[in-house]
Amino acid sequence: MKKPIYFLFIAFNSYFCHTVFSQNCDSLEEWNTIIEKEFPELNTSRLRSGSEKSNRILYNLYSDKYFIPFANKSFENINSIWGNSKWKKLRNCRSKKKYSTLKHIGWLNQFALEPLWNKRVTDKVRTNIIELNKTRSLYNEIISKLNSGIVAFDELIKYKAYATKEFRMLMPSEIETLLSSIKTKETSISNSTIIASANEYANKKIDINNLQQLYNFRMSNSLVYDRADESTRKKANEIVNQRIKEFLDTLVPLEQKKLYQIQSLDKVESFYSNFNKYFSNFTNYSNVKALNNDILEKKTAIIVGQSDAIHNKIAQSSNIEELNAIESVYLSRINQKQATIVSIKNSLKSRAEFIKSKEREIAINKEKKQKAFNDFADKRISEIKNLRQLLKIKYESNLPTFENLQSILVDFTNTINNDATYNVKDANHLKQYIEAFGYMSTQSKGLSDLNSFENSKGYRIIMGTLDTHDKNIGVWTGLVIPNAPEDIINLYRLELNSNYREVSKSVFPFIEEFERHYNNLKPLPLKTSKYSGFYTNVGMNLYNLKVDDKGNLRVTVHNNFDGETNVMAERIDDNTLKVTSWTNITDVYVNKGDILTFTAQGKIRVGLLSATPDGLDGWESFSKVRKLRHSALIGKVGHDSWFEIGSKKTIKASSSGRLYLRINETHVNNNDIGYWSVNCRIK
C-alpha cells in the first residue's frame, strides 16, 4: 500500500514544482509584454545597461505598480534571501522552450533580474524606485484632479510641462494618458478662464493705465486666449472692446479740456507726446480721432501766432541742418494746407535753395583753392629741387635734405644697442647710405657717440647721442658747411619754412604764404635770422638752422621721442586741432567760466595697439596721469589739474589760461604716427 502512495507523492510533487516554476516564469513573460507595449520599437539586445532608457524600464518594473503584481509585495520590503531565492527560480526560464523566444528575454535574464541578487544594484534600484513611487503618486493625484474637472488653466499648463520634466521616468502610456486628459480639458478650461479674465479686466477702474491693460488683454492672456474656441474668443473680445469704449467716452473729454487750456508750443508738444503714448492704439475710435485733430488744429493756431519769429529763424539759418530742425519743430503734426503754414513752408524751401547754392559755391571755391594750393606746392617743390641741383653743380657737393638727415637720424638710432654698443651690420648700412652722398667717414673704426663724415669741400655730416644708455634721448644728426654761401643758407631756409612749422606755432608758414599769394597780398620776405629755433611736423623730430658768427651753417635734426619738448598742436581749421603723441600745448586761451565742448576722433598707434581718444584698458603705469584712462585724450587749463576728455566732453573752466591737450602716455617713443582730430567750441 505504501508503494502506490509513494509514487503518487512523487508525481504530485513533480507536478507542483513544475506548476510553481511555470508561474514564476510567467511573471517574466508579463514583464516582456509590458516592455513590448510601452516600447514597441525597442530592441533591448542593443540597449546599453545604465543608459537612461534602460534605467527607466528597470526602475518602472521594480516600482510598486509593476513589482507588487510580480511578487505580491513592494521591492522596498524584500530581503536578500527572498531575492536570491526568486532569482534562482527565474534564471533558468530562458532555457525553457516556451520562454526562449520572448523578444526581451535576453535583457530580462541578464539585467532585469540583477536587482534580486546583486546588492549594489539592489540598493541603487531601491533608492530610485522610492522617488519613482512618489512621482507616480503625484501623477495619480493629478489624473484624479483632471478627471474631476476642478483644474485652473495655470495648473493645466504646469501639468503639461510635467510630461517632459517631472514625469519623464514614468512609462510612455502614462504620459500619453496625462497629455490626453489635458487636451480633453484644455478647451473647456480655456473658455471659462478667458471669459473670467475678460470680466476681471472689464471691472477695472477707469484710468489711463488700465486703458493700456485693456488694450493689451489679448497679448497678456495669449496662452489661454489661443486655446479657447472661436466663439469664446469673440465673446471675450466683445467684453473688452465694450469696456474700452466706456473708458474712452470718459477719458477723451477730460483730455479735450486739458488741451483747451494749453497756449504754448512746448505744452502742446508735451500733450501730443502723452496722447501718442496712451491713445495712439485707439485712433479708429471717432472720439480719439477727433482729439487727434483738435491737437493738430491747436498746434497750427500756435504756429500761426509765431509765424513772424519763425520766418526770422529761417532767414538767420546758415545750414540745412538748422532748417531741418525748424521744420521738425514747427511743421510737424499741423494743418499743412493752412495759408500761413504754406507761407512758412515756402520760406523754408527758398532758404534751403539759397543755402544749397551757397554750399555749391563754397565747394567750387574750395576745389579751386585746393587746386591753387597744389599748384603752389608743386611749384615750391620744383623750386627747391632745381635750386638744390644748381647748387650741387655750383659747389660740387651733394646737399642732403632735411628728410635725408631725418633718415640718417632714424638709422643711427637703430644702430645703438641696449648695452650702449653699436650694431656693426646696421652701422655698415648707415655708412654706405651716407657715403652715397659723397661724404666719407673721418673715423678709422666703427660708429661712436660722435661721428663725422666729410666731403672734398669740407662739408660734414655729423651725428651723435647725448645719452648712450637710452637711444631715445638726445640723438641728433646735422650738416655743417664752413663759411656757407648765402645761396646755400637760403636753400635750407626755404626748405625749412616750406615743409615744417615752428614748434610754438599752430600753422605752417607755407600755408600762411599761400594764403597771402591766393589773396593777392604781397609775400613776406624769407626769414633771415641766424638761428631759426626749432621747427617740426608732427612733433616727433625737431629741425633747426643756425649760422654762427664765422658764417658756418649748421642744419640739425633732433629726435623728440620722449615728447618732453613743448610742441603746439597743429590747427586744422578755426575750431579743430591735430593732436599727436608729441604735441602737448595749443594756441587756445580760455577764460574762467567758459564752457568748453570737445569732440574727438581718429586713431594713434600705441605700441602694438590702436588707441582712440577714449584710450585703452590697463597700462596705468605708463600714463602721464595715472588716475585717468591710459592713452586717452586729456586736457587742462592753465595750472589746473588734468582732466579726461575722451571722444566727447563738456566742461566749465574753473580758471583762465592756455588750453593743454595731449595723449595720456609717458612712453610716446613706442608710438607711431597717427593723430586725433579734436574739435573744441567755447561759449
Image (cartoon, helix red, strand yellow):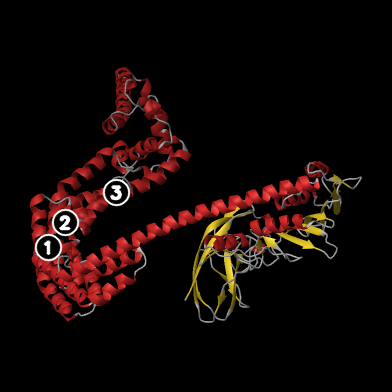
Residue in view at x 63 percent, y 78 percent: 639
- Amino acid type shown at disc 3: Tyr
Q: Decide if residue 512 is on the left or right side of residue 270.
A: right
Residue 456 image point, x, y percent = 86, 46
- Amino acid type shown at disc 1: Val
- Amino acid type shown at disc 2: Ile
Disc 2 marks which residue?
150
Residue 184 image point, x, y percent = 15, 46
Q: Decide if residue 231 is on the left or right side of residue 158.
A: left
Residue in view at x 19 percent, y 73 percent: 299
Q: Alpha carbon of mark 1 to alpha carbon of mark 2: how far?
A: 26 Å
Q: Is residue 4 visible?
A: yes
- The kind of secondary structure element at disc 1 is helix
Disc 1 marks which residue?
240
- The kind of secondary structure element at disc 2 is loop
Q: Residues within 10 Å of mark 2 (few under 14, many from 20)?
A: few
Q: Alpha carbon of mark 3 to alpha carbon of mark 1: how far?
A: 33 Å
Disc 3 marks which residue?
162
